[in-house]
Image (cartoon, rainbow, N blue to C red):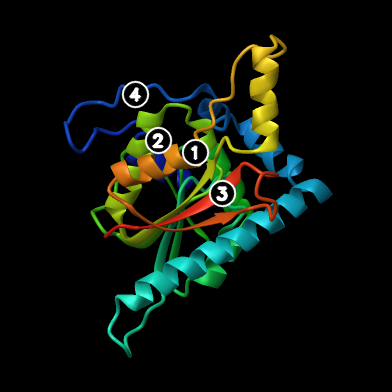
Amino acid sequence: MNLETDAQKTSPLPMARSTGQPDSSPRPTKLEVYRDPGYAGDYDRRWSGTRGQKRDRRKAAAIRLAWASLVADWSRDRPEGLRTEPRSLLDVPTGTGRFTDLFHELVEGQVLGADLAVAMLLEAQEKHPSGQYCAVDGLHLPFPDDSFDVVVCIRFMHLVRDSEMRRAFLREFARVARVGVIVDYRHGHTFRIWGRHLRHRLGLRKSAPSNPSPKAIRSEIEAAGLRLVAEHRVHFGRYMSDKRLFVTRTE
């Protein structure tokens, strides 16, 4: 696959499907950083140490639990004897493909990694030469409805501070997902985030944390037309980590 060619075919900001007008939504500054080739090359190096590997193992374990919850819920809707394992997955944004191997373990069929940052995709393709990757805008995915069984979104929503934009991403993920969406959020009900709020009130921090509460996240999921199936903490301690995976169905 020639990523440069794919990127040229799919504009970084394609025409919106619903209005036919160019998308004018401001992208968070952090998202633009990931498009820098230098940053993309450094990204994996920063996560290749002991601490990064430990975090990846925790996240991978949570993803496996989330996947099992989704499959179990879907199986209840399937006639006995029919295949109940999802066979296609869209990983968006895939970044440098840190979880590509895991997704191939979970899915026997197609696994497609998608990202707006071509620089990150080139890193992913170098690590996984046989992997499938394409450059897309997550707000306007260039795929028909129900193109994939499952859409997985990991380590992204915390970069999107605006609630309406998060809902817009969720709606687009739901549009192309036939079975469900697994999405990773960082919520505000942890000791660390509460401590940041306290420092803000004491004048020791310029701005208050913007992490949504678990209740607010559930409201965003419902507003996007998704049904919440399960939640899985990435860290075993209830208030020790702000990272949580939300398992949803598109029906």
Of callouts 3 and 4, the N-terminal one: 4
Task: State the residue position of label 4.
Answer: 25
Residue at 68% across, 39% down: 43
Q: Nearer the viewer, mark 2 or mark 3?
A: 3
Q: In the drawing, what numbered circle is on residue 166? A: 2
Of callouts 2 and 3, the N-terminal one: 2
- Determine whether the residue tagged by mark 2 lies in a helix, strand or loop: helix
Residue at 83% across, 50% down: 50
153 or 194: nearer the eye? 194
Task: State the residue position of label 3.
Answer: 244
Residue at 64% across, 11% down: 206
225 or 193: nearer the eye? 193
Of callouts 2 and 1, the N-terminal one: 1
Q: Position of residue 211 (x, y in %)?
A: 54, 31
**Cα distance between the residues tagged 2 and 4:** 12 Å
Q: Position of residue 207 (x, y in %)?
A: 60, 15
